[in-house]
Structure formats: C-alpha cells, structure tokens
Amino acid sequence: MKISGLLDGVDILDVSGDISGDACGLCYDSRKCEKKSVFVAISGVQFDGHDFMRDAVKRGARYVVYDKGNAPTLPGAACIKVVESRLALAMLGRNFYGNPSRDVCLIGVTGTNGKTTVTYLLESILKAAGFSVGVIGTVNYRYGGNLFPAPNTTPESLDLQRMLREMVDAGVTHVVMEVSSHAIDLKRIYGCEYDLGVFTNLSREHLDYHRTMEEYFLVKKRFFEDVICGRPAVVNVDDPWGARLHGEVPSPAVTFGVDGPRDVSAVDVVLSIEGIDARIRGIGGEFTISSPLAGRFNLSNILAATAAALSLGIPQGHVRSGIGALDVVPGRLERVSKPGEPMVFVDYAHTGDAMEKVLETLSEFRKRRIITVFGCGGDRDRTKRPGMGRIAAALSDLVIITSDNPRTEDPLGIIDKIEGGIGTGSPRYVPEDITGGFMGKGYTIVADRREAIGLAVSVADDSDIVLVAGKGHEDYQIVGGQRFPFDDRVVVREALSTRRAGEVC
C-alpha cells in the first residue's frame, strides 16, 4: 500500500526523507517490524517507542512516525513528525485494514460498572435476532467460535483495527465493544465508526490515572463528543454523571433507568435470587422480560441493553428472547455452589460502588449471614481501599480481608489501607477465633487468598451467603512481576469439596 494512502487523515507536521513508496506493514513494537514497514513511536506506561526508533529501522522499518523532538537521523528511513502519535496510529491502522468498522454495526459500551454484562446481554439479543456477533471486552475477545484472551479491556488501536478486519472477513455483522477510559484517553478507539454508544454509570475508579472524578468524567464525555460524533447515545440518567452527560453531549440520546420516567424503563419489577421479572416500557410499547440475572443493578444493565437494541431496531421478541437466554456472565455474581451448600458467589466487584450494589443485592435475599472475602489490586487507585473496607464491613456480617493482585506492592500494606476504612465499630478477630460456630460480627485478615476463601467456605452455614469479590472471571493472580494460575471459582469449588469431605467424615 502506498504510504501516502496510509497517511490519509493523519495530521503531519514535518517530513524528512522520501514518502513516495510503498509500505508493507505497520507496527508500534519495534520487535515486530518487518521490511518496508511503518513504525509508529507511541509513549506507554513503561516504555516510550521513541527510544526504539533506531531498532525499528534495523529490523526493516522504512518509515518512522513520531511526535517528540526534532527529526532523528535514521539512514534508510523517512521520518514523519505528527501532531500526536497515538492518534496517527489509530488512523494508520484504520487505513491499513480498510476501515473495517464501516462494514459492521459497531456498538461501544462505556462506564465504570456494568460494561461486561451489557455486552453479554447485547450479544445474546443480537444472536437471537439472527446476527453474527463479535465481542471485544474484559473477559475475552470472541467471534464465530473463536475466542482470544483479553490483555486489555479495549485493545491498542492497531490491534483493534486488525481484529475488526478479521471479524468482517469472517462474516460478523455486529460488534459489541467495551470502551475503557484508558482506551478513550489513549486514542485506541479513534478511527472507528460507531453506530451507537452506551453509558452505564460512573463511580470512583482509576483515579491513579485520571486523578479526579471530574477528569474521569471528561474522558468518558470525549467518547460521545469526539468519537460517536452525533450518532445515537444510550444514557443511564439514574446515574448523576449520566444525567450530566445527557445534558452536555450533542448526540441524540435515548435515556434509560429504573427511577422515574425514562425513554426505556421497567415497572412491575420482581427481584429474587433466581433472577428478574419485569415489564419494560419504552420504544415501541410494553413487553415483559424474565432474566436469570439477579439484582437491581442487573436490571439497570438489562435496561441499557434493551434501550440499545431497540434503538437499533431489534424487534421486542428478540430482545425478550436474548435477555432470557443469558443465564450467567462469567465472574459477575456467578453462583459457584450447588443446592444444599452455602450460596457462594464470585463477583468482579473491585470498586466501592460495585461492592455496595452486590452486597445490597445479596442482603435482600439473606437468610442468615453474609461473609465477604476481598482485597484490592496493587499499583492501582489507592484512594478507594478504605472506602471498600467501610462498605464491606457495613454490609457484611464477617469480612475476610485478603490479597487481590498485589503486583509490586506489599500485600500487607494494601490490607492495612483497607482495614483503615473499617473503623472501630467492627471488631477484628484472628482467624482461629471465627472457626467452630462463630456468630459474631467483625473481620479478620488472611493474606493468602486461597486460605481466605477456604476459611470463608469452612465457617459458612448452609444458610449463609459467601461473596468472593474483586477478581471475578480472572484465572490468574499477579504477585510481584509474576502471573500465577488462580481462579476464584476453581478455588471455591475445591473448598466446597473439602467441606463436603469433612462433613462425610
């Protein structure tokens, strides 16, 4: 492909060298550069691509795109200075792969919580309507029977364009994508033509990156202002940030919510631990739905998916069928235990808001105690840790504070911050104190996550509810710089098996 064609839509400041030839590849990792390729130097969290421009040329790159400093001296390569390398990478990727988003119906779902569940619901609805669906999100990337691990909620722009091209070539008609705030801020989703954007909610998260809630909101707002660009938006106006977004963005919006009159809302709602029954009011009239998903927060997720589907012209019957067909979302209030055992749920809740919503849901259906096992991730927003401790203690009978993904932080240092939010109203016990029929209210600390889960399951009565929160679908634990196999669901099943064996003895 001619380099001039690849550069279409890229804001160029300066050119040094010949850019009249062909380009045979595109890369942002110098190790993946091949002969006649274009290397785009982007700045990352750990590395800066500008430090690897010479290496890229040694490996065959003919063109180097950069946005820092003066033109480097790279014999045999043309250097192209642009306004912003990340935006240039997005546009180059779009051009290289033939603008694949133009050939599918692309739906972007953004917000703090609920993104994954909404994408699963939309996938189920669209499949019920007979479409071929691709999904890009936190749990995995998938289409047409293919499933790939998801290193990021939203891939880097070049990888995203490549995946969209693969989906289009495989016959995918609709793509549902989780859009993270990092992806918006780092321009990963620029160059995509979205048909619809969905906003779920906003709560305290990623403040290690965004610094303030206002900055966090403004990044989310950019998705609707800069990327959606006048295409329809579906907005949760029950959420205060959603209500503000609805009033500030120019996109035509369909509102949804549980509280008050909305374009799409629910009445005659019946919530149980077994699921949700409701009558939906909105676009095209009323219809009933029944979902195996539990909780008021999942009702909001259902309304988001319903509003999006109806906005796309999906018939009510397919909406109803798709909602009913989705019985579980991996790691999202996923019940791991069997009848006759304590009800044990694994959930991805790793923010105060998500923790509160999940525990409030479980509190509605409690028969006896709620036992919560959780920790907080290392090298991430440290400000949320005390708040999560406070919420867990307030809404649980027994809290077992443990490790999540400590990464490079000291696990006990993270636990100390969580414990600081609990306050004096909830007494601390040593683990040995809560065995043998313990019925008090309080908390304990077990830094080893496997041991913490085992303790929670062993002390739970058959009428208790156990929530293991924070990691959800993840099948690993990151300690230091290493990633170890660890799946809360597997560990819970092992603990339940040990419990059953003990009862038999």
Image: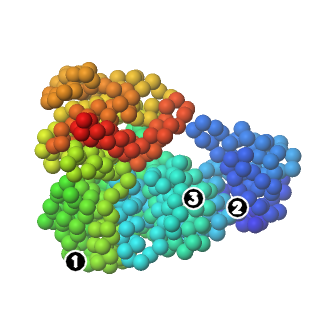
- The location of residue 409, given as percent across then percent down, is 47, 27
Vertically, is 372 above or below 275? above
Which residue carries the number 3 mark? 160
Residue at point 44% right, 75% down? Answer: 131
Of the image marks 2 and 1, the number of the one nearer the N terminus:
2
Q: Is residue 222 visible?
A: no
Give the mark toward the camera: 1 or 3. 3
Comparing labels 2 and 1, the label whose residue is closer to the camera: 1
Q: Residues within 10 Å of mark 2 (few under 14, many from 20)?
A: some
Helix, strand or loop at mark 2: loop
Name the image quarter holding the N terminus. Answer: bottom right
Please, what is the three-letter code of the amino acid marked with disc 1? Gly
Residue 444 in the figure: left or right of residue 379? left
Residue 177 relative to residue 102: left or right = left
Q: Tag 3: residue type?
A: Leu
**Residue for badge 2:** 7
Give percent across and percent down for residue 152: 51, 49
